[in-house]
Image: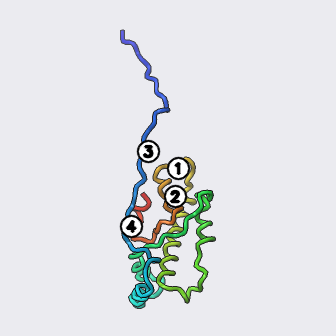
Amino acid sequence: MKENKKLETTNTEIVPQAPLIQITDNRREIDELTDTEIKEIEKELEQYDKCMWRHLEQLQKFKHIGGEIPKDVPFTEYSAYIHQNFRNPKPRKEWTARDYKVEASRERRLMVAFAIRNNGYKEPLTDRQKRVVERVRNGTDFHVSFEKLWELLK
């Protein structure tokens, strides 16, 4: 007669955590451009209506790292924090190419923050959710092509 043995398992085993996926962004920071480079960009952008998709598509060649959200702000409040604290105080008529890029980056970041709130991210977060939340918190530029955006949301 065979004897049935019970296998005892415990949940105390240490499972290695997947490393944070690093995404390299080789675009130049728009804040680091000289005034002459900004003027050249603006001259190139004159052929497009401001805020139209071609105009914004050209600005995707550059990156803007937005302001960092403090760690004590809950991730469900990121969209409100971005909306209240990262606005451009200048009137839109006075905006430069840099201002349009900063605004486009802020709007995409706000869109991702809204998705976090509206998709019901709840504690405990999955690894993927933690990565997305951290990228929104640290000011990652989400104003990129949609193919690259999916990479940022992995």
Residue ID for mark 4: 25
Looking at the image, residue 104 sits to the left or right of residue 40; the answer is right
Q: Earlier in the sequence, mark 4 or mark 3?
A: 3
Query: Whole-percent x and y of residue 46?
Result: 42, 90
Work out whether mark 2 precedes mark 3 in sequence or the reverse, and give the earlier one.
3
Mark 2 and mark 1 lie on one chain; the one further toward the N terminus is 1
Position of the C terminus by quadrant = bottom left
**Which residue is labeled 3 in the image?**
17
88 to the left or right of 143: right
Tell me the amino acid under the disc marked 3. Gln
Q: Are marks 2 and 3 in contact (CB under 8 Å)?
A: no
Q: Dot 3, crowdedness within 10 Å: few (<14), some or many (≥20)?
A: few
Badge 2 vs badge 1, beta-carbon distance below 8 Å: yes
Question: Type of residue at label 1?
Answer: Leu
Q: Dot 4 lies on which element? A: loop
Q: Give residue 27's position: percent from left, percent from top.
A: 38, 72
Q: Which residue is mark 2?
A: 133
Q: Nearer the viewer, mark 2 or mark 3?
A: 3
Q: Is residue 83 left or right of residue 99?
A: right
Question: In terms of sequence position, does the residue under pointer 1 or pointer 3 come before the other?
Answer: 3
Sequence-wise, the earlier of marks 2 and 4 is 4
Could you give the CA–CA distance between mark 2 and mark 4, rounded to whole angstroms? 18 Å
